[in-house]
Image: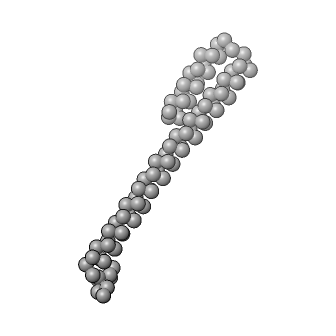
């Protein structure tokens, strides 16, 4: 959930509950809302980091495959990577 959405919901709930609650109850509700928002932010950050790590791993794997194919093709054609004869 986006931070702004969570904040808006927390403020709305806080405003509605302010009518019937004591100051102590309001403070407790605010603490709870802030903790929930922080937890959601942590989860969103973890998801983003996981997506980035997965993309980086995929790119690295693709590069390794490409280098392997290049080396295998060079071996098949009888020349090394700089174009000189391997034999």
Outermost residue on the top side: it is 20
Q: Quadrant of residue 86?
A: bottom left
Residue under the point 42% across and 53% down? 55
Residue 26 on image: x %, y % = 68, 21
Colouring method of the image: one colour
Outermost residue on the right side: it is 24
In the image shown, does 53 or 39 lie closer to the viewer?
A: 53
Q: Quadrant of residue 17?
A: top right
Residue 63 on image: x %, y % = 38, 64
Relative to 31, say whether 59 is above or below: below
Q: Quadrant of residue 78?
A: bottom left
In the image shown, does 30 or 68 lie closer to the viewer?
A: 68
Asked if residue 30 lies left or right of residue 24, the reply is left
Residue under the point 46% across and 48% down? 51
Residue 42 on image: x %, y % = 58, 40
Q: Can see residue 29? A: yes
Quadrant of image for the C terminus: bottom left
Residue 25 on image: x %, y % = 71, 19
In the image shown, does 41 or 65 lie closer to the viewer?
A: 65
**Number of callouts in the render?**
0
Residue under the point 30% across and 77% down? 75
Q: Can see residue 84? A: no
Asked if residue 86 lies left or right of residue 59, the reply is left
Relative to 11, say whether 49 is above or below: below
Residue under the point 32% across and 68% down? 69
Relative to 32, say whether 43 is above or below: below
Relative to 18, say whether 65 is above or below: below
């Amino acid at each position: 959930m986006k931070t702004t959405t969570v904040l808006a919901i927390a403020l709305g709930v806080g405003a509605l509950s302010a009518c019937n609650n004591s100051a102590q109850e309001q403070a407790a509700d605010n603490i709870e809302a802030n903790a929930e928002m922080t937890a959601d932010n942590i989860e969103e950050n973890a998801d983003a980091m996981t997506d980035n790590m997965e993309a980086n791993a995929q790119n690295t794997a693709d590069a390794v495959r490409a280098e392997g194919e290049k080396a295998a093709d060079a071996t098949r054609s009888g020349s090394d990577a700089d174009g000189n004869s391997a034999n």
